[in-house]
Image (cartoon, helix red, strand yellow):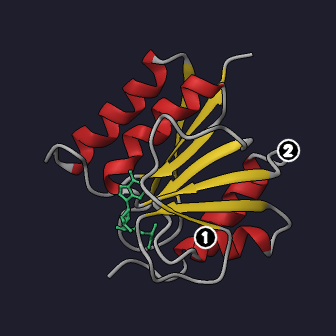
Amino acid sequence: MADKRRFDLFADLLVARFPDAKRVFDVAGGMGKLNEALVARGRECVTFDRRHKHLPVAYAEREFTLDEPCAADLVVGMHADGATRVIIEYAARHGLPFAVVPCCSDNSMPYKPWMRHLAALGTSLGLTVEELELPMEGRARVLLGHRVL
Ligand SMILES: C[S@@+](CC[C@H](N)C(=O)[O-])C[C@H]1O[C@@H](n2cnc3c(N)ncnc32)[C@H](O)[C@@H]1O
């Protein structure tokens, strides 16, 4: 069972580390709880997920792909599974920062190699990647990707 505090903890981190990012794409956001937490902190947020059942937040009921038009200052994903790699590629394509809390891989890779793979992907795409940890149970390590100025 994933830690129920994860949305507030991640939202606090995002606001602290990306204070100028007003518009956030929350990819693979499930019910939209991270969206709620970000809006409560003064951010605009759109959640992308294929789910039909979700909270009454700004929500795009579809798969997030690299073709999604960009209307964000920051792209993020909490336990975004198969969308995690897409988030990093999307951020690089549009010159955005990203933040992901990886969980399951999209290719059966175990957790630690998956983390290394994602960090290397961000670096290879020209972003500076930083690793942090949220104070919670379960998959809690965070990768932040910053544009190289
Ligand atoms: C483990 S759940 C996590 C949901 C939520 N972020 C949370 O922490 O509770 C993974 C979610 O990723 C969504 N997902 C996976 N690939 C996706 C994609 N390409 N676009 C949108 N949603 C995706 C699934 O529909 C699922 O809701």
Q: Position of residue 2 (x, y in %)?
A: 37, 77
Q: How many marks?
A: 2
Residue under the image location 41 percent in, 65 percent down: 50
Of the image marks 2 and 1, the number of the one nearer the N terminus: 2
Estimate how packed mark 2 is, as few (under 14), some (14 to 19) or many (20 or more) residues with alpha carbons within 10 Å.
few
Locate the C terminus by quadrant: top right
Relative to 101, is 10 on the left or the right? right
Q: Residue 147, how many percent across, how many down? A: 67, 24
**149 w.r.t. 26: above or below:** above
Give the quarter of the image for residue 28.
bottom left
Q: CA distance from mark 2 to mark 1?
A: 18 Å
Compared to 129, does 71 lie above or below?
below
Q: Which mark is residue 20?
A: 2
Residue at 23% in and 38% down: 113
Residue behind mark 1:
34
Q: Nearer the viewer, residue 130 or 37?
A: 37
Q: Is residue 1 left or right of residue 144?
A: left
Residue type highlighted by circle 1: Leu
Q: Nearer the viewer, residue 130 or 51?
A: 51
For numbered disc 2, what is the local secondary structure? loop
